[in-house]
Amino acid sequence: MGEYSKALEFYEESLKIREISLPTNHPDLATSYNNISTTYYAIGEYSKALSYLERSLSIKQKSLPSTHPHIKSVMN
């Protein structure tokens, strides 16, 4: 499993800090959700990965223009 469990711990801790210090629609929160999603995907937990990816996309759609490359990258 490599260091995925350790990565998840760090990503989740980072997310907690960002949730406290940033507004709910801040793009950095989307980055945290995306990082967690990518890690879950890598270990085959696809439903969890999708859940975090959807949260990431939701924030990006609210905080960035629809033509922004970060939104397009999630949609592909």
Image (cartoon, helix red, strand yellow):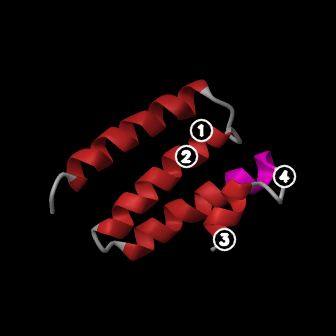
Residue designated by label 3: 75
Which label sits on residue 65? Answer: 4
Which element is circle 1 on? helix
Residue designated by label 2: 31
Q: Tell me, yes or no, whether the two marked residues, 1 and 4, touch with CB atoms within 8 Å.
A: no
Which element is circle 3 on? helix
Could you tell me the amino acid type at mark 2? Thr
Query: Horizontal and vertical percent for residue 13?
Result: 37, 36
Q: Tell me, yes or no, whether the two marked residues, 2 and 1, touch with CB atoms within 8 Å.
A: yes
Residue designated by label 1: 28
Label 2 – label 3 distance at C-alpha: 15 Å
4 or 3: tag closer to the N-terminus: 4
Tell me the residue at 59%/38% (across/down). 28
Q: What secondary structure is the stretch in magenta mostly built from?
A: helix
What range of the chain is rendered magenta?
59-64
Label 2 – label 4 distance at C-alpha: 16 Å
Up-down relation of residue 67 to residue 46 (above or below): above
Label 1 – label 4 distance at C-alpha: 15 Å
The quarter of the rendered structure image containing the C terminus is bottom right
